[in-house]
Amino acid sequence: MRHQCKRHLLGRPKDQRDALLRSLATALFTYDEIQTTMAKAKALRIYADKIVTLAKRGDVHARRQAVNFIYDNSVAGSVCVACNTYNEQSVEEAKCECGGKLVEATVLRKLFSVVAKNAQERQGGYTRVYRMPPRRGDNTEMALIQLS
């Protein structure tokens, strides 16, 4: 019996479900908001909150654990190595205000520099889910999930 074993199964086997949530979380941290179905948004909310909690911790072990939950793709911009701030500029364009070296921004670096700073004073609830009009093709309930 499955008493108190609630999981968002999403109609997929475990490996496909993990890959789906991993790619959705990567897109969420890359673009700060994504539009998806309500079922996927509810499953992603739990998943993303755990990753942001890891980012708030900020140590090396948390970074290594977070790599298991997201794809570390490159994003537009750069991150300063010295002060750990995110810049919209590319690596070749300029230096940081502190004089530190700029490196290419990845999802993991953006997560630990931008998202962790924004969520530092919060105790939870790092994502918001808004209802959207249903999808035109199959009338599926849609949602907009964004980082708060």
Image (cartoon, rainbow, N blue to C red):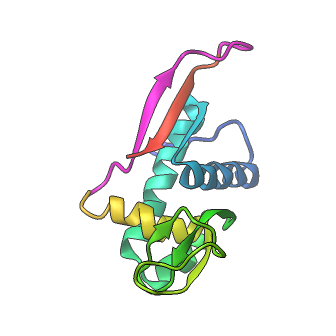
Quarter of the image that includes the N terminus: top right
Would you identify the image quadrant in which residue 104 lies? Answer: bottom right
Give the quadrant of residue 108.
bottom right
Image vertical order of residue 140 relative to residue 60, above or below: above
Q: Does the image show residue 5?
A: no
Q: Is residue 74 left or right of residue 134?
A: right
Q: Is residue 54 left or right of residue 41?
A: left
As displayed, is residue 22 above or below residue 74? above
Q: Residue at x 44, y 70 (%)?
A: 113
Residue drawn 54% across the image and 37% down it: 41
Side of 64 relative to 56 (left or right):
right
Residue 67 at x, y percent in the picture: 61, 72
Front residue of 75 and 47: 75
The magenta span reads 123-139
In the rendered image, residue 129 lying in the magenta stretch gets the answer yes
User: Residue 127: horizontal and vertical position, in percent?
Assistant: 41, 45
Q: Can residue 41 be seen here? A: yes
Q: Is residue 60 above or below residue 9?
A: below
Give coordinates of residue 32: x percent, y percent.
Answer: 51, 48
Q: Residue, x 66% and y 75% (percent of image)?
A: 92
Q: Is residue 60 magenta?
A: no
- Residue appearing at x 69%, y 64% in the figure: 73
